[in-house]
Image (cartoon, rainbow, N blue to C red):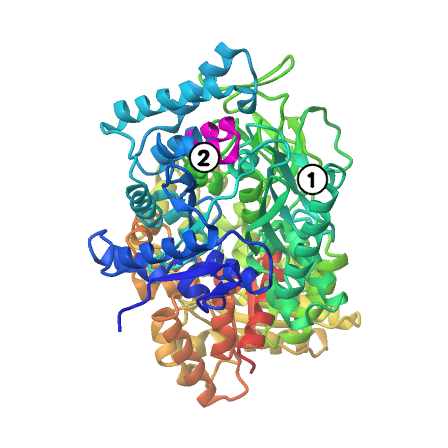
Amino acid sequence: MSTKWVYFFGDGQTDGQENDRNLVGGKGANLAKMVTLGIPVPSGFTISTEACTEFYKNGEKWVDGLEEQIKENIARLEKAMGAKFGDKEDPLLLSVRSGARVSMPGMMDTVLNLGLNDDSVEGLAKKSGNPRFAWDSYRRFIHMYGDVVMGVEHTLFENAMDELKAREGVELDNELSTEALQELVEVYKGIVKESAGELFPDDPFEQIRGSVDAVFRSWNGARAIRYRQLNHIPHDWGTAVNIQTMVFGNMGEDSGTGVAFTRDPATGENIFYGEYLMNAQGEDVVAGTRTPHPISDLKEEMPEIYNQLVDIYKKLEEHYREMQDVEFTIQEGTLYMLQTRAGKRTATAAVKMAVDMVEEGLIDKKTAVLRVDPQQLDQLLHPMIDPDAKYDVIGTGLPASPGAAAGRIVFTADEAEEWVERGETVILVRLETSPEDIGGMAVAEGFLTARGGMTSHAAVVARGMGKCCVAGCAAAQIDYANKTLTFGETVLKEGDWITLNGTAGEVIAGKIPMVEVQVEGSFAVLMEWADEFRVLGIRTNADTPNDSQVALDFGAEGIGLCRTEHMFFEGERIAVMRQMIFAQDQAGREKALEKLLPYQRDDFIEIFSTMKGLPVTIRLLDPPLHEFVPQDQATIERLAQEMGLSSSALKARIDSLEETNPMLGHRGCRIGITYPEIYAMQARAIFEAAAELTKKGEEVFPEVMIPLVGTLEELEVTKKICVDVAETVMKEKDVEFKYLVGTMIEVPRACIVADSVADQAEFFSFGTNDLTQMVFGFSRDDAGTFLPEYIDQGILERDPFQTLDQVGVGSMVEMGVEKGRATNPELKIGVCGEHGGDPASVEFFHRAGLDYVSCSPYRVPIARLAAAQANIKNPR
């Protein structure tokens, strides 16, 4: 039996594909589902994703049987619609659109009005009784097919259109006469011949073949590949192709087209939200060439259509139990639905919708917790414009995506990527964005466009990426040639700072102060639900009382990593630290350490007080000592004078600290073993702080962590230092307090001998940053020069320093957990690398049986939600 490559939908029938989005893509499955729900959908058929993957395996040629099945389904369409594809008298016209199994808006190609040529356009004009509509459709087809399939630069068509409008004395495309459009068709065909070196095809099936090939190839287009990389979508899925009967919104003032959402995708409010244009085709709404009307206006303009649209959107949301993004066309007073899919939304909207839908009885709490992407919460957890800040708004546009961002002005996507690579933060300023801008949009802080509405490309992409956007800012005069942005008399140049307030649609000159966010409302409710379902504890990496408080406010249950070395860089401390490093002997080091002790003790008192009895894991000194020494000549000379040394002698000592490979050198517990007085001072600071607060009646629970342990003996030596100091302090202060001494597991050998290490360690904490470095043999500081190439070539799926390599590094973690708990079944185990705030890594740590993860303060809610989702999917 031959393989089925093509699936029909329409006229009340499907081929049973409506629940198989992997086979026919999200769009194909949803079109078929709408047919089964009795919703008016133009008939069509879907070429499967499998046909796309076979296309690439077959040297970019169609798989055997595909051409025949396409022709069979065109015949089914002709029978259903009572018209013939490419017919001179009554032509059936088709659209060709992509449709991957997950939504990739704007990343792949579309061609409309297939089947038109010099003969069928006359038939369309006669049949419709509307010659202007027929020739408008034909010029659109040549433009789109020439651009998408034949590789003709789209600006050539746009320039020809602008020249014709200027000559005809009109502003809008829909004001051109039939005769002008006929002339434009000939101009467009000339552009194709000159630019592509061949004639525009007039054979309808050749048009189908070219369009299907273009959609297949767009799966591996640069913007689609980049989108998949950004959203962690597998490259081997392929795209389906949806071929559908054309319906026309450009047949006059009783026709139109629109895009709508069943809830507000920016705020989550339960209102019907969208835009439409009369006498237009779909691309006009998102292209920004005309200003669309809010969907509420349709209630007055075409009340019956509006009410039908409301009934349909409610039916769809009820069926999918999810906010839908729908596209529709009105052809001569008849409504057709062209698409439904789960709508892209901001984090604010995602959280509100999830909570509201539970309260409305549409979904349960588990579904609500699973519904919100943990990574998306990141956009809720960053500063907004300080309400007390004084600033002048130089321009206003549409509040297309909320939040605030400040950056330096750049005018192209390529420049955005170049500036960010140099360490700058940028705002991408464009007349309008297009899918080709995806790389620059990914790195920019926000976007400002002069054209486009709330459903324009810039707006949709911004909401999906969680970035702020001000769109349709008509007052913005953008001069690409001179790289200027002008509002009235205010002229800003490339590199100047601007601030965007995406919530209010404001553009502000300069860099405006921001304020921290507050966790409340629907967000707080969702976090409470997440905490009901998770079993993994969530701690924070914090070195200051302020960071500790921020993390507590976000729901942290303790500190999983307090880095003591960061405390040595403040104020006078760095000078004392350097005196200790350059001391001639132990007595000299101890003298300097006595000066550092009160600083460290006071730091710990503040942090312990802030954490109010929650566990605080403090890592003893980890980095190599050369990181603390001066490198500039002026500081070296000043320090030499203070120490009574010549600058050359001090420089020689600095040079002696240099190591060939410092990340594998004299650092971590190796410092504590060679200079035990350093660890003894730190332990005393920790335990004196604990004693002081315990005497005051405050609860304190310090956990002392020894870094970079690879052998049991290293831990025994360094643990003894800490235990001896703790006993001495408790005796001196006449007080008792609880504490633990454990180790950071970051050397592969520690995972292999974790059973023996667990004999002394009271807890493990995986330092996955260093563990990743050592397992891969990658230098953390240098891997950025080649890792992007690894990901582009598919050698690695993701950067292993951002998302844990579960096969390699993950195996070491699992080994460490298994061996450690074989010795001590009650061993507390956590992770404190950056992976503790990465959702995919959190899910792995849950499965591996860890007790907690620790992450930066602003990622605590992300980790809470990810941990809840992990337990719902794989209950412990």
Q: Nearer the viewer, residue 798 or 627?
A: 798
Question: 438 or 294: nearer the eye?
Answer: 294
Left or right of 219, for residue 675: right
The span from disc 1 to disc 2 (Cα, nearest Å) is: 46 Å
Seen at 43% across and 23% down, the residue is 158
Q: Earlier in the sequence, mark 1 or mark 2?
A: 2
Task: Specify whether residue 201 is painted magenta.
Answer: no
Label 2: which residue?
A: 124
Q: Residue beneath label 1, please? A: 503
**SS assignment for the magenta stretch, majority:** helix
Whether residue 454 is visible here, answered yes or no, is yes
Q: Quadrant of the N terminus?
A: bottom left
Give, as a three-letter code, the residue at label 2: Leu
- Residue 71: quadrant of the picture: bottom left
**Residue at the location (25% across, 61% down)?**
65
Where does the magenta region start and end? 126-138
Residue 305, image quadrant: top right
Q: Where 35 sits versus 873, above or below?
A: above
- Residue 129, horizontal then vertical, whole percent: 53, 31
- Residue 543 seen in the current view: no
Residue ID at (53%, 67%): 680
User: Residue 621's spot in the image, x, y percent?
Assistant: 49, 61
